[in-house]
Amino acid sequence: MPVTRNKLDPAKLNPNASLPFELRLEDFRLATQDVYDFFFDVNVSLVAKGLDRLGACRAFPATPSGRQLGQLRQFKQTPTA
């Protein structure tokens, strides 16, 4: 599967958020885009080497429910005595 570059949808940011330290929503948008770009570059490099993308492997479950599902799968695969 090809690696696609994600872009943050600015409409998803809360325009009424009360931000500390004179931060702006644009600061969060730029920081989030930097993270997206970093993972895009890492994933392109991994795929070029024939390895799985970070999102495709189970190393980083995205949510607590993802972790619980992983633990449940592991539990189901454990043989009982």
Image: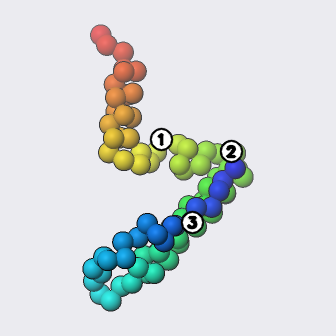
Q: Is residue 32 visible?
A: no
Q: What is the CA distance from the residue labelled 3 to the residue labelled 2?
A: 18 Å
Name the image quarter holding the C terminus.
Answer: top left
Contact? badges 2 and 1 (CB < 8 Å): no
Q: Is residue 10 left or right of residue 67?
A: right
Give the colour scheme shown.
Answer: rainbow
Label 3 crowd (10 A; few <14 / some 14-19 / many >=20)? few
Mark 3 vs mark 2: which is more N-terminal? 2
Q: Secondary structure at mark 1?
A: loop
Front in this rendered view, residue 28 or 38: 28
Q: Is residue 49 left or right of residue 72?
A: right
Q: Secondary structure at mark 3?
A: loop
Name the residue tied to disc 2: 1
Residue type at mark 1: give it.
Arg
Name the residue tied to disc 1: 58
Residue 77 picture location, percent across and down: 40, 21
Residue in the image at 32% along x and 37% along y: 68
Mark 2 vs mark 1: which is more N-terminal? 2
The disc label shown at residue 7, or none: 3
42 up-or-down from 76: above or below: below
Residue type at mark 3: give it.
Lys
Name the image quarter holding the N terminus.
Answer: top right
Tag in front: 3 or 2: 3
Residue 78 picture location, percent across and down: 36, 20
Residue in the image at 52% along x and 67% along y: 8
Q: Is residue 60 left or right of residue 17?
A: right
